[in-house]
Amino acid sequence: MAESYNGYCVKCREKRDFTGEVSESNNRRMAKGKCPVCGTTVTRILGKAQV
């Protein structure tokens, strides 16, 4: 399920809105998607996953 998130693009050096998928590892949720301007992978850590 793709949702819209706001994350920091390291290549553009700006915060961008991106659509991404939520993945989970080490009990942490993370949204991962592409920057709409440059196409670099943008991630945002969302917090602990509910067990």
Image (cartoon, rainbow, N blue to C red):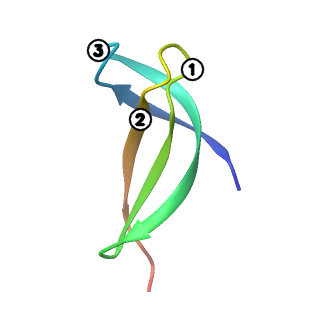
Q: At 29% across and 75% down in the image, what residue appears?
A: 26
For this orientation, the residue located farthest to the front is 39
For this orientation, the residue located farthest to the bottom is 51
Residue 39, placed above or below residue 19: above
Q: Between marks 1 and 3, how big is the CA–CA gap?
A: 13 Å
The mark nearer the N terminus, 2 or 1, is: 1
Residue 6, placed above or below residue 15: below
Instruction: Name the one closer to the observer, 5 or 37.
Output: 37
Res. 42 mark: 2
Q: At 31% across and 18% down in the image, what residue appears?
A: 11
Instruction: Name the one closer to the observer, 7 or 25.
Output: 25
Residue 2 % position (x, y)? 68, 48
Classed neighbour count for the residue bearing mark 1: other residues with Cα under 10 Å, few (<14), some (14–19), many (≥20): some
Q: Which residue is mark 3?
A: 13
Q: Which residue is mark 1?
A: 36
Instruction: Please state which amino acid type lies under the numbered disc 2.
Output: Val
Residue 41 % position (x, y)? 43, 35
Q: At 50% across and 23% down in the image, what residue appears?
A: 39
Question: Which quadrant is the N terminus positioned in?
Answer: bottom right
The mark nearer the N terminus, 2 or 3, is: 3
Instruction: Please state which amino acid type lies under the numbered disc 3.
Output: Arg
Q: Secondary structure at mark 1?
A: loop
Residue 45 % position (x, y)? 35, 51
Q: At 47% across and 21% down in the image, what residue appears?
A: 16
The mark nearer the N terminus, 1 or 3, is: 3
Instruction: Please state which amino acid type lies under the numbered disc 1.
Output: Pro
Residue 22, placed above or below residue 17: below
Q: Secondary structure at mark 3?
A: loop
